[in-house]
Image (cartoon, helix red, strand yellow):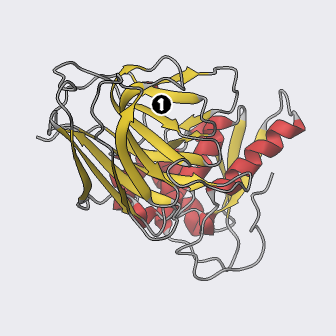
Amino acid sequence: LSLGWTTGTHTDLSQSAYTWNMVWDMLDIVEEGEFTDQIIVFQARLSLIHNSVPQLKWLFDNVKQSNIMIMHEDGDIVVNEEVMYVAYRFPPHGVYFDLNHDIFQTILDQYRHFSRDRVNHLVLKRDEVMFKPDAWLKMGFHKQKHSLLASTEGILLTVSIVHIVSKSTYLPTPEISIQGRIQFMNRYNKQAEDYHTGVNIYVRPTDYGHFDNIVAIRCFIGVGGEIEVTGSNLPENTPNFRKTARVTPTSANCYRFRITDEKTHITFAVKSLHGCTTLESVNEDEELVGLLTVPLPAGLESDKQHPFVIKLEDSKRQVLIDELSVPHKS
């Protein structure tokens, strides 16, 4: 199965990629074709690899018995690092090369098992923030087959009746934050609602067994750039502490966030990004400025450890979450 763009010569491909929507289309084709007990080979072009490895690795991780075929066309401009990037990220049994060029084949033969030493430094930077599927639990309606599509490259949440919960628990402290990057997708061409279409990150949850009754402090990022901190199903006598802000005057598809539970208040930092697909967009430790600092009312103090919970507020968008981590300040 070809992802397209397999013919013709292209010169400047620095911003080009096989998009997340394209690889999701490939997954849908395999599902609709009901291919069983067959090896699926996805064909991709080496000149488009620079910004496409996360998407292709996600596809490989989510399609059973799949492989990636990397081809090179004469006339395409390719950096040697791209060959090493593929060799580094994919297991040897999962990727094949049709390089049609002696120099690339020689590089592959000599350095395939030492590829880490020859990749772009940003590839190693992404290693530091790789998504860890085993660190999260799926909760909600487990019969929803494609409600979660996880990989080491990120996780797609597709419906609001399923959420993920961190296996580790954390104390409220300024030394610990949850941070990551989110990309919204509109697969079904639905109209978004302000303060309703987006993703929730729940802090300090005490009950999260059911998707529509999560008891926690709710931090919301909307597709329209709106952010909100408020209570979620807290006791009725809890004073209102809702605060809102807007990251951007118009909607955006890509945001980076950091949430810190500082025991007496929540600090919520969100930044709109121009794009999340290029390799150069990997987190370079840029400083995120807190847009909301929300004092918590008396009675919400806690010295207990809690997990983090992530869930779509509605199902009018799908969200890809990557570079998700809970770092501790040294």
The x and y percentages for residue 304 are: 20, 18
Residue 268 coordinates in the image, percent (x, y): 28, 49
* Residue occupying the point 26% across, 53% down: 292
Asked if 286 appears above or below 58 in the picture, the reply is: below
Number of other residues with Cα within 10 Å of mark 1, as a class: few under 14, some 14 to 19, many 20 or more: some
Percent coordinates x, y for residue 22 in the rendering: 70, 56
Please identify the quarter of the rendering in which residue 20 is found: bottom right
Residue drawn at 78 percent across, 43 percent down? 28
Relative to the observer, which residue lies in front, 199 or 119? Answer: 199
- Residue situated in front as seen by the camera: 278 or 1: 278
- Residue occupied by mark 1: 133
User: In the rendered picture of this protein, how many numbered marks are placed on residues?
Assistant: 1
Residue 205, quarter of the rendered image:
top left
Type of residue at label 1?
A: Pro
Is 138 located above or below residue 173 in the figure?
above
* Residue at image coords 73%, 56%: 189
The residue nearer to you, when weighing 185 against 217, is 217
Q: Is residue 325 above or below residue 13?
A: above
